[in-house]
Image (cartoon, rainbow, N blue to C red):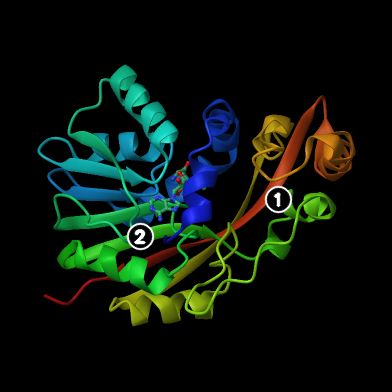
Amino acid sequence: MANEAERRRWNDERWVAAWPHRERLTETVTPYLLEAARPRPGQRVLDIGCGGGALAIALAGAVAPGGEVVGVDLSASLLDLARSRAGEAGASGLRFVQLDVQTDSLPEAPFDLAVSQFGVMFFDEPTAAFSAVRRALAVGGRLVFACWQGVEDNPWHVGTALRPFVAAPPVPPPGKSPVGPFSLGDDEYVCEILEAAGFSRVAATAHRTSVRAPASAVADPSLLPVMGIAAQREEEALSALDAHLDRFAVGDGAYEYPLAFRVYEAVNERA
Ligand SMILES: C[S@@+](CC[C@H](N)C(=O)[O-])C[C@H]1O[C@@H](n2cnc3c(N)ncnc32)[C@H](O)[C@@H]1O
């Protein structure tokens, strides 16, 4: 089955409690994404890999009155979080659907705009997934998404520190691509995929910023089992996390993380 490991991983209930901490990092990127996306009242918007729904709720406000936002995601538990947040925010014109963007048909197409904040790096067939997104756009519809630059420019990520405790990811079978937060870190590769998926006028803007946030924004001990760390190695892994975090400490229990990401824009010009 497509994206089987990712489906399992993102459906782990433990993400829900950790999510607001993680969002301290990703919400730093939201203003850059919204500035490029330019959502307008009346537009129909698809939020790809919407997670806990914070961006979708902001988009719903921006396309009101008369607009509509559909947030789609693989994760049932994160979609539950998104629905409860939308209810608390009193958001209207917004719904959330559990599906795999790569393989399932996208409901209520065509959209004027497809947006994603770090939700597009986990497709094991990225050209197929981006083609499906393009087909869900109206002619002239735009795709705007944020993804991380390479891991070397995002030293906050715990992957390198935890590598000794996690089994190496399997080599993808023929026809499948590696997935993960940095899978779209190479600009040339991303442009190739988007063009192969039929998009026109592909453009990327590279950004660097930093965010002050607690340790839990990048290293949440409750997620160690989700990352595949065996219970008997948790103590060692926690020490490695402490050493990792020390690099970003700025005093008084605060940390400053440098972030490097790109915002891509592309247009569907095909009928
Ligand atoms: C890093 S999170 C980003 C979530 C959210 N956009 C945010 O900024 O907080 C990636 C999200 O993409 C979703 N995702 C991964 N692969 C997907 C797929 N094939 N179809 C739909 N959603 C997917 C995951 O379930 C997860 O919620």
Looking at the image, residue 152 sits to the left or right of residue 209; the answer is: right
Q: Which mark is residue 157?
A: 1
Q: Amino acid at mark 1?
A: His
Residue visible at 23% across and 35% down?
Answer: 95
221 in relation to 198, above or below: above
* Residue corresponding to mark 2: 144
Residue 221: x percent and y percent? 73, 32
Residue 175: x percent and y percent? 47, 78
Looking at the image, residue 264 sits to the left or right of residue 239; the answer is: left
The answer to which of 108 and 156 lies nearer the viewer is: 108
Residue visible at 17% across and 49% down?
Answer: 44
Residue 72: which quarter of the image? top left
Q: Amino acid at mark 2?
A: Val
Give the SS element for disc 1.
loop
Residue 32: x percent and y percent? 45, 51
The answer to which of 183 and 153 lies nearer the viewer is: 183
Can I make out residue 29 in this image? no
Can I make out residue 182 in this image? yes
Distance (Cα) linking label 1 and label 2 = 24 Å
**Mark 2 crowdedness (10 Å alpha carbons): few <14, some 14-19, many ≥20:** many
Residue visible at 19% across and 28% down?
Answer: 92
40 in relation to 103, above or below: above
Give the SS element for disc 2.
strand
